[in-house]
């Protein structure tokens, strides 16, 4: 029999501290939708997605209700669209993207990820179609999310792709200028892209995955923050070790909830259960912030010295708790620091406490990278590429996933405030110093060779 | 339940709470040659209550068993009841799932009655019940066996409506979410776990 205090502590976590399942992502392999004619391809794609995913939202809602835990976002991820677009052109890419958009709408999901190209070692014809079509696709669709992997531990950094993405970002921003460059918020540029990531915009289904699988993204910055505050109230003098322990225990509990929901949703849909992603993913809501956790850990101004160490401790403790809770941990599994989606981080940028360089340093100890960072619209493409290259280097050398989701907001200057709406939040434009000072480096092109760490065999 | 000896009795003891009651009761039944087959004890608001299943090789009058325990308590004024533990007449087996109901709100008479009457009307068995008044607030927690044929969303809607009439926040959640967050054990998928009672 359960004890009363156990029941009450779970109730507090679920209802007072707003623990939820952030994302249930159904990943579907669409490689068998390939066809020489684009109309035929689109018909197969739509039928496959709708037949696999039409029950996803209903099942998530039913399972969530049974346990009293809301499943906030239901999403789809597909195998890389580049494999279907080989031999086709940009017109076909737009047609395929429109079908994905419509299928997502039919299934009632908020996003579909997998408009993806994997170009860490070179760019195939299908990859090129994906990359070149991104401005139009992201401007003309609502629910399609894209990702491009430009670097990996085994391959190094494809600097030609990095350079291209600098220009693509500018083009996407221009194509969606009326929405303040919002199209860039639906594109993630990766190193070491995870093949089972449930979080958008970078979710896709990697090679080696089954025909269909359910991946879960739990969250809970608010739960972790509340647990820390409670611990500090109970014990006047807690060490960082004590606080790390509290994070670990909370992360364990959060992860178990995710796995419970994920396994049941997968069983009801008749597909395999994939992974639980342990990431702490903030939202713009007050009390759902990774920045707030850093403040609770004693960093008054996020970005101040100590911020990286505090984040490293948080990230590590989250992993340790989660790893013990589930044998199916995957995806990104770390603390996210998306600037516009975290009100405390956005506030720190506004007050000048958090600058781009410190943000980059912090990404070396957490997931995912420079995420939802709004920069001036006149930042040169080569400078954007150089920012991407720096972030990719952190991932390649440290054998971890890093990513960039940068939005060069057309017409915006440092300090301007930009609002992307909903879960994407709002943030000030962050200053990019030394803009234009890396052009020659980017123009060399080629590939930064794989590091020593690649020779692990 | 399977008892050690064939003659089984239910023993119920209530008293003011203080150390030593279980020791006195268990000594008294042991002196009768009885085995304690199961027991459950709790303290509520300073009052002690204990329920035991005991069994003996030879039959004994229930009143004599109760009197033996009462006498052993001396000046503690134990209230003791005993009755034969006949095999309960089991209702036809019903497939059930375990759920937890939690309700909290401003205290007023009739809370336990309203919820328990609703549950009884749905043939939902209460396995464990906890209620506590703190300040003006009353918290009620029940661990339930819910017949599997009920649509949970309908039960939740009824209970939430009742809660809103009483000014109470009411939740009905499958027990696995509480097990998952508190206990280190493998959880059987609920579609494979349907108990019968």
Image (cartoon, coloured by chain):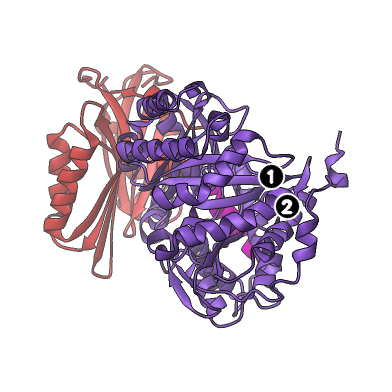
Chain colours: A purple, B red
Q: Residue furthest bottom?
A: A351
Specify whether A261 is left or right of A440: left
Labels 2 and 1 touching (C-beta < 8 A): yes
As drawn, B79 above or below A347: above
Which residue occupies the foreground of this view, B195 or A307? A307
> How many numbered marks are there?
2
Report if residue A184 lies within the magenta region.
no
Residue A207 in which image quadrant: top right
The mark that comes first in sequence, 2 or 1, is 1
Q: How far from the left and from the top, in percent, is residue A79?
A: 54, 32
Please provide the residue range marked out in magenta: A240-252
Q: How far from the left and from the top, in percent, is residue A86?
A: 58, 30
Q: Which residue in the protein does label 2 denote?
A: A395
- Residue A192 disc label: 1
Q: Callout 1: few (<14), some (14-19), or many (20+) C-alpha neighbours within 10 Å? A: many
Label 1 SS: loop
As drawn, A133 above or below B32: below
Quadrant into which the N terminus of chain A falls? top left
Q: How far from the left and from the top, in percent, is residue B8?
A: 33, 23
Question: What chain does mark 2 sit on?
Answer: A
Specify whether B14 is left or right of A325: left
As drawn, B120 above or below A383: above
Quadrant into which the C terminus of chain A falls? top right
- Residue B134 disc label: none
Q: How far from the left and from the top, in percent, is residue B78?
A: 31, 49
Question: What chain does mark 1 sit on?
Answer: A
Magenta stretch, main secondary structure class:
helix
């Amino acid at each position: 029999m359960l004890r009363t205090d156990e029941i009450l502590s779970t109730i507090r976590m679920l209802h007072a501290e707003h623990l939820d399942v952030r994302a249930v992502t159904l990943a579907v392999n669409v490689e068998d939708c390939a066809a020489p004619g684009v109309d035929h391809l689109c018909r197969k794609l739509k039928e496959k997605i709708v037949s696999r995913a039409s029950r996803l939202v209903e099942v998530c809602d039913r399972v969530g209700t049974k346990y009293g835990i809301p499943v906030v976002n239901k999403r789809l991820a597909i195998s890389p669209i580049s494999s279907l677009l080989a031999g086709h052109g940009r017109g076909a890419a737009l047609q395929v993207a429109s079908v994905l958009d419509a299928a997502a709408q039919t299934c009632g999901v908020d996003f579909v990820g997998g408009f993806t190209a994997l170009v860490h070692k070179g760019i195939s014809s299908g990859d090129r179609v994906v990359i070149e079509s991104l401005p139009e696709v992201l401007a003309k669709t609502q629910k399609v999310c894209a990702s491009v992997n430009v670097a990996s531990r085994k391959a190094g950094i494809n600097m030609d792709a990095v350079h291209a993405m600098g220009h693509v970002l500018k083009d996407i921003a221009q194509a969606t200028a009326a929405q303040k460059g919002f199209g860039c918020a639906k594109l993630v540029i990766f190193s070491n892209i995870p093949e089972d990531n449930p979080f958008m915009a970078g979710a896709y289904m990697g090679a080696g995955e089954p025909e269909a699988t359910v991946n879960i993204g739990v969250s809970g910055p608010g739960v972790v923050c509340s647990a820390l505050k409670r611990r500090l109230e109970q014990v006047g003098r807690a060490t960082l070790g004590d606080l790390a322990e509290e994070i670990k225990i909370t992360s364990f509990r959060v992860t178990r909830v995710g796995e419970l929901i994920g396994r049941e949703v997968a069983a009801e849909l008749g597909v395999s259960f994939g992974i639980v992603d342990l990431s702490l993913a903030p939202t713009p809501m007050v009390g759902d912030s990774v920045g707030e956790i850093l403040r609770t850990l004693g960093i008054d101004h996020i970005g101040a010295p100590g911020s990286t160490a505090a984040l490293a401790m948080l990230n590590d403790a989250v992993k340790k708790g989660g790893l013990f809770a589930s044998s199916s941990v995957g995806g990104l599994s770390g603390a996210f620091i998306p600037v516009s989606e975290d009100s405390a981080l956005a506030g720190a940028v506004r007050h000048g406490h958090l600058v781009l360089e410190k943000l980059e340093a912090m990404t070396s100890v957490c997931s995912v990278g420079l995420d939802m960072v709004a920069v001036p619209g006149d930042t040169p493409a080569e400078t954007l590429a150089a920012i991407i290259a720096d972030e990719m280097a952190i991932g390649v050398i440290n054998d971890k996933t890093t990513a960039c989701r940068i939005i060069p907001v057309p017409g915006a200057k440092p300090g301007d405030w930009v609002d992307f709406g909903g879960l994407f939040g709002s943030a000030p434009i962050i200053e990019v110093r030394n803009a234009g000072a890396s052009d020659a480096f980017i123009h060399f092109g080629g590939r930064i060779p794989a590091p020593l760490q690649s020779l692990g065999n | 339940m399977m008892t050690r000896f064939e003659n089984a009795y239910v023993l119920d003891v209530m008293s003011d709470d203080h150390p030593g009651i279980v020791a006195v009761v268990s000594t008294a039944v042991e002196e009768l040659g009885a085995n304690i087959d199961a027991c459950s004890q709790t303290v509520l608001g300073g009052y002690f209550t204990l329920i035991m299943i005991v069994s003996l090789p030879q039959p004994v009058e229930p009143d004599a068993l109760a009197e033996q325990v009462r006498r052993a308590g001396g000046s503690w004024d134990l209230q003791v009841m005993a009755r034969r533990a006949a095999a309960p007449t089991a209702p036809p087996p019903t497939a059930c799932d375990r759920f937890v109901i939690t309700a909290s709100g401003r205290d007023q008479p009739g809370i336990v009655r309203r919820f328990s009457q609703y549950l009884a009307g749905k043939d939902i068995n209460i396995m464990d019940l906890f209620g506590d008044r703190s300040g003006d607030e009353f918290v009620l927690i029940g661990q339930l066996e819910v017949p599997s044929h009920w649509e949970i969303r309908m039960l939740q809607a009824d209970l939430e409506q009742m809660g809103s009439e009483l000014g109470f926040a009411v939740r009905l959640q499958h027990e696995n979410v509480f097990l998952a967050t508190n206990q280190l054990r493998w959880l059987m998928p609920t579609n494979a776990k349907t108990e019968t009672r």
